[in-house]
């Protein structure tokens, strides 16, 4: 009797979780030591768009602003890489003087929000067990925005 009751509830919850999708992705990188230097990147699908393009708004430093478009497939690839990040906060302990920080925020269709935060990303992050997923997602974001990892403040 319990199984007959639990099965519809399980199917209902499964359909809710599978029906939500990411509506917007935001990336922010800055360094507390260097004022007015930051990178803000926002990915947002274009409404009423038959080709499924996604708009990327990039704001670099204080004045540089520009926009690109990427395919929905590339947007999905970036978001799946972000969702593979195991820890929501990662930091490099050896590099306490570097004030660089990066955060990624995902917004879903149901109004939910999930954030990831990292400090002190550098070249060694790609092999660090705690940072490699965040580093890879950041690399995909920077590549889609036509920026290099070296454009991030404090990236060495």
Image (tube, rainbow, N blue to C red):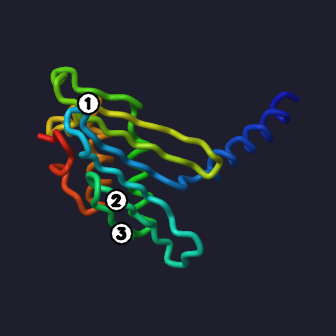
Q: Residues within 10 Å of mark 3 (few under 14, many from 20)?
A: some
Q: Position of residue 44 (x, y in %)?
A: 48, 60
Q: Position of residue 94 (x, y in %)?
A: 16, 21
Image quadrant of residue 141? bottom left
Residue at the disc numbered 2 = 58
Residue at the disc numbered 3 = 68
Marks 1, 2: nearer the viewer: 2
Q: CA distance from mark 3 to mark 2?
A: 8 Å
Q: CA distance from mark 1 to mark 2?
A: 29 Å
Quick check: marks 1 and 3 in contact, CB under 8 Å?
A: no
- Asked which secondary structure carries label 2, the reply is strand
Residue at the disc numbered 1 = 129
**Which of the pair 65/4 is nearer the observer?**
65
Task: Indicate which disc, 3 or 2, sits on the residue closer to the N terminus.
Answer: 2
Task: Indicate which disc, 1 or 3, sits on the residue closer to the N terminus.
Answer: 3
Image quadrant of residue 148? bottom left
Q: Residues within 10 Å of mark 2 (few under 14, many from 20)?
A: many
Q: CA distance from mark 1 to mark 3?
A: 32 Å
């Amino acid at each position: 009797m319990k199984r007959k009751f639990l099965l519809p509830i399980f199917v209902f919850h499964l359909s809710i979780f599978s029906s939500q999708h990411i509506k917007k992705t935001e990336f922010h990188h800055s360094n507390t030591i260097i004022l007015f230097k930051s990178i803000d990147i926002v990915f947002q699908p274009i409404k009423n768009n038959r080709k499924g393009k996604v708009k990327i708004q990039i704001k670099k430093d204080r004045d540089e602003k520009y926009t690109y478009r990427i395919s929905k497939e590339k947007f999905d690839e970036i978001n799946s890489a972000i969702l593979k990040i195991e820890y929501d906060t990662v930091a490099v302990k050896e590099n306490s003087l570097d004030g660089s920080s990066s955060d990624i925020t995902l917004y879903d269709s149901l109004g939910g929000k999930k954030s990831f935060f990292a400090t002190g990303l550098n070249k060694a992050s790609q092999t660090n067990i705690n940072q490699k997923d965040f580093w890879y997602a950041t690399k995909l974001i920077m590549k889609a925005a036509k920026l290099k990892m070296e454009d991030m403040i404090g990236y060495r």
